[in-house]
Amino acid sequence: MQSSGADRVRRLLTAAAGALLAALMALVLIVGFRLATRIRANVALLQRASLLETYPSALSQQLTALRERLGTLEYTGGVHQELADSVAGFDRNLAALERRPGVDRPVLRAAGRLWKAYTPVLAPVLAYSGEPYSDTDFGSSLSVSGKIYYTQVRRAELFAQSSAPALHRRLAALSAALQQRTSSAASRLRLLLSVGVLAVLLLGAAAAYLQLARSRGERAARAAEEQTRDILHTVREGLFLLDADYRIGTVWSQALTHLFGREDFAGLSFEELLRDKVSPATLVTATKYIKLLWGERAHENLMKSINPLGQLEVVLDNGRGGKETHYLQFNFHRVVGPQGVKHVLCTVADITSNVMLARELHEAQESAHSQIDMMVSMLHSDPLQVGGFLDTAAAGLKHVNAILKEPARSHAEFSRKLTGLSRELHSIKGEASALNLMSIAQRVHHLEDMVEELKGKSELTGNDFLPVVLKLDELLAHLRAVREVILRLSTLKDGTPSPEGTLSSPILRLRERASGAEELAATLQGLARKLAEDHGKPFTLSLEGLEAVPAAYLPTVKDCLIQMLRNAAVHGIEPDAVRRAGSKSVTGLVRVQFRRLESGCELVFEDDGAGLSPETLKEAAVRKQLLTAEQAAELDNRSALALIFKPGFSTRAEVSMDAGRGTGMDVVAKAVYALGGRIGVSTHPGRFTRFKIALPAPSQTAVA
């Protein structure tokens, strides 16, 4: 009774310590969250203020660069645009600071007055849209408007140089005030966390002490009652002792009979207990482990961590003439006496239901995570674009299914099937990534992995494609779920009920309000932002003439531009350090231009990145075993550039969501050729890569 009362006291003390610890942690978290929120807001303001500090010198530099370019009769459009972006950026960030509370208002108003003085001198420069140069028989010179423009730029430059120090001081003072506020809040947060950690440590030490005392009491109770038959008949776990010869003692729990379907355990060796239940390899490992437990120097906690019988799969008779698979968990405890290890106490529990429940829980968690990811991406996606993508993806997967059904016997026929599957899946994944539908893109990426694994096999049969078929069915089911979600979201946004299982009037009405060119532009700009963020390479995407793309060409143009945009982000645009070293703007530029000509249509895709090196392309072709070293050496530069359109070619050694499979430009070329067009590439290493796609007039092409 005394032992039982002491246990109750220890449990009450442990529960009280736990409750106090939880309350303290909740208090620290609540107060800490409020302080962290305040710090986050201050940091955001500080970032804007720090960004504003860079603008005065940047404006001076841009005006100087603009004047110098006018003086040397160079192209001024890029610098002019950068100047306009800087002015707009200063206005935007200054306005954002004015709207936020907690900013030093007098300093901010003083900075605003200084900035307003810039407007009269910058406005004429920014408003200029004429042609600054005129061409004569004696060469180029400044035009009349160009000379006025030059004077305005020079005036703005001088004003900016004289006004920049004062404006910078005001902005620096603003940043210093915000930094002081942030530092003060951070100090309070650190103090709070320190106090909380100290209190948690103290409470944790108290709880650990109570837990340790409780454990000692329990071990003492087990040692005193280890051979009590009444307990052994009631416990649900199998209990028995192993002696130094690894044989079971004369006392064991009744549960052992139900677990192993026998009653003659006394004197039975541990090896005989498991011989017919596990594989020979597992039996050997378990026997060696039991022997290790008798070593004097064996560290018991370490031994527990390497227990090979923590989850043992066994096949037992079900009592009806059949067999059932169960999972048993063995735990071992050494019973140590004055002379060393006396016995090893073995406990056996049937954890079959736990294992099954864990599996079900894991599957449910995976499904829940997938649903959450899908919902999040849907909330940030345009229902019109997603609806169009789902239609395109459904058609593409029908084609994939048709490819899988094609009969094949030879290795060459199987290889053609795999190539067709790669192209279709790559196109679907590209558009899914462009719309940030990562739950779909990742599933398609996994399908691509399976196809690539099949490509590596020397011999293929139809059975090898069964996993691909199953994974394709899962993808189709996921697409149906996505369609259902987007239908519900579009219905909620439009406010009109949607017929079950149809593309619904809300999306149809959205399609009536948006052109294919607008949808394509939105898709490409969204993909550009995502690629720039994923790869840490800021770049600007310029789109011209997409409204001139014929409706029959829109799907092909979209697929081509998505792939080329991904290639530009991965292979073309260089990291910041490389661009600075090459005297380039940190922000890259990707330009897309579509125009109609008398002979048809022309699509130009250009990036100002690293360009293509013929030697690098040759080395990659040899590494991918597409060419021998001798064949590569014989290629001229033009033939080397054509390697990028070869199936399986890629300069990247590893595969990612955006590159590495060697499928992208092959897909682009095939799509262009299918329309009767041509594609060409030109490059200047370190400067640019330009693709020109010539397409016939739509009337000259048979559209399916």
Image (cartoon, helix red, strand yellow):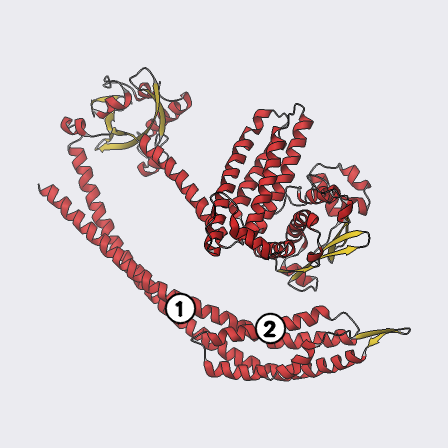
Amino acid tagged 1 = Arg
Q: Which residue is mark 2?
A: 88
Residue most toward the top?
321
Q: Position of residue 250 (x, y in %)?
A: 20, 21
In terms of depth relative to the viewer, which is nearer, 265 or 474?
A: 474
Secondary structure at numbered mark 2: helix
* 567 displayed left or right of 613: left
Amino acid tagged 2 = Ala
Q: Which residue is mark 1?
A: 38
- Viewer can see residue 654: no
Q: Position of residue 122 (x, y in %)?
A: 65, 80
Classify 660 as above or below 597.
above
In terms of depth relative to the viewer, which is nearer, 372 or 651?
A: 372
Q: Position of residue 168 (x, y in %)?
A: 56, 79
* 384 displayed left or right of 603: left
In terms of depth relative to the viewer, which is nearer, 316 or 9?
A: 316
Classify 10 Å Cα crowding around label 1: few (below 14), some (14-19), many (20 and above). some
Tell which circle, 1 or 2, labels the residue nearer the N-terminal end: 1
Label total for image: 2
In terms of depth relative to the viewer, which is nearer, 209 or 239?
A: 239
